[in-house]
């Protein structure tokens, strides 16, 4: 019989009472035979905890489940805490409003088995709306207009990640040993660009052109909220700054250009805000 290593499926949950049951069901239905499910509720103010606890009561005999609920500490702190709780040789995250597609775990695991030089692999996803209706067949190509052919070798992959960041969440699988080199920056609210830049710089990440999850687009996505816009832009800039030291001269030039381009909307926003406040002060 084939020996299947333990894979940890980690779910950061926050205010997704309408979606989280579907997320958890998708983990249970996936046919990979040796997995654990670890969930942290990060201070939800809706009925997310109630939904999770009810689901666990009905399924605790089918899957090894760990659940913790606590006050809100933010997504990156939650991801680091989930990693610390995990026991698997491999780790994947699925947010509590997204869900796994059939065979999504096995496909990524097989890629990493066949490419032992890689510590991580990312894939594609379908995109659904809040009702679960598919709106895009490819998150990479249709939602973010990425050219997937550019992910075919490490050099092109590095450039594409730097110049055209276009990877939805929920598609990556990572060997746990990778987190000895890298931890999520807990000051950020967008976690993924930072680690993609780091792994790409060292040629430790590969691409598998398969749909492994569904990315749900709705008005409550954290990074889409207007009040988070400035912070997201700053996180993008700081992700490039943090990873500059890992890249050669040509790649540094592209990263500096991206920093400049992301500063521009921040400056425009500051000028607009200043002008509005000036006008208000005169009335």
Image: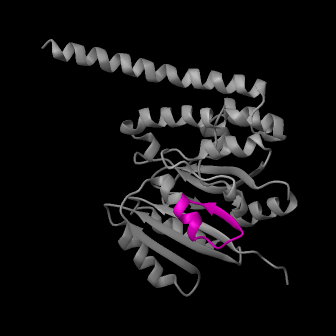
Q: Residue furthest bottom?
A: 61
Q: Which residues are magenta?
A: 80-95
Image position, residue 50 (x, y; %): 36, 73
Q: Nearer the viewer, residue 186 or 99?
A: 186
Residue at 58% across / 25% down in the picture? Answer: 259
Residue at 85% across / 54% down in the picture? Answer: 117
Residue at 61% across / 37% down in the picture? Answer: 242
Q: Quadrant of the N terminus?
A: bottom right
Image position, residue 161 (x, y; %): 69, 36
Image position, residue 2 (x, y; %): 84, 80
Q: Residue furthest left?
A: 283
- Horizontal side of residue 121 vs 98, given as left or right: right
Question: From what the image shows, is residue 265 above or below residue 237?
Answer: above
Quadrant in which residue 238 is drawn: top right
- Horizontal side of residue 231 vs 167, given as left or right: left
Question: From what the image shows, is residue 60 above or below residue 32?
Answer: below
Question: From what the image shows, is residue 50 above or below residue 124?
Answer: below
Image position, residue 120 (x, y; %): 74, 54
The reply to whether the magenta stretch includes residue 88 is yes
The colour mode here is: one colour
The reply to whether the magenta stretch includes residue 150 is no
Q: Nearer the viewer, residue 15 or 39?
A: 39
- Horizontal side of residue 190 vs 36, given as left or right: left
Q: Number of numbered discs present?
A: 0
Residue at 78% across / 40% down in the picture? Answer: 151
Q: Quadrant of the C terminus?
A: top left
Judge whether residue 95 can be spotted in this image. no
Judge whether residue 109 can be spotted in this image. yes
């Amino acid at each position: 019989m084939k020996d299947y290593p333990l894979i940890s499926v980690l779910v950061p949950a926050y205010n997704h009472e309408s979606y989280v049951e579907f997320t958890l069901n998708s983990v249970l239905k996936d046919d990979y035979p040796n997995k654990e499910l670890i969930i942290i509720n990060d201070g939800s103010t809706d009925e997310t905890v109630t939904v999770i606890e009810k689901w666990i009561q009905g399924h605790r005999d089918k899957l090894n489940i760990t659940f913790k609920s606590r006050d809100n500490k933010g997504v990156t702190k939650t991801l680091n805490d989930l990693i610390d709780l995990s026991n698997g040789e491999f780790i994947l995250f699925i947010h509590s409003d997204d869900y796994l597609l059939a065979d999504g775990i096995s496909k990524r695991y097989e890629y990493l088995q066949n490419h032992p030089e890689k510590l991580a692999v990312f894939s594609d996803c379908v995109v659904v709306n809040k009702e679960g209706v598919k709106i895009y067949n490819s998150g990479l190509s249709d939602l973010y207009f990425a050219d997937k052919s550019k992910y075919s070798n490490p050099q092109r992959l590095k450039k594409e990640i730097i110049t055209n960041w276009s990877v939805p969440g929920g598609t990556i699988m990572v060997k746990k040993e990778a987190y000895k080199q890298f931890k999520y920056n807990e000051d950020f609210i967008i976690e993924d660009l930072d680690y993609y830049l780091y792994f790409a710089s060292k040629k430790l990440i590969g691409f598998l052109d398969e749909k492994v999850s569904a990315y749900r687009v709705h008005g409550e996505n954290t990074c889409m909220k207007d009040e988070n816009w400035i912070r997201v832009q700053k996180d993008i800039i700081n992700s490039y700054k943090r990873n500059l030291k890992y890249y050669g001269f040509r790649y540094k030039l592209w990263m500096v250009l991206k920093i400049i381009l992301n500063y521009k909307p921040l400056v425009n926003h500051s000028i607009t805000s200043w002008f509005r406040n000036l006008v208000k002060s005169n009335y």
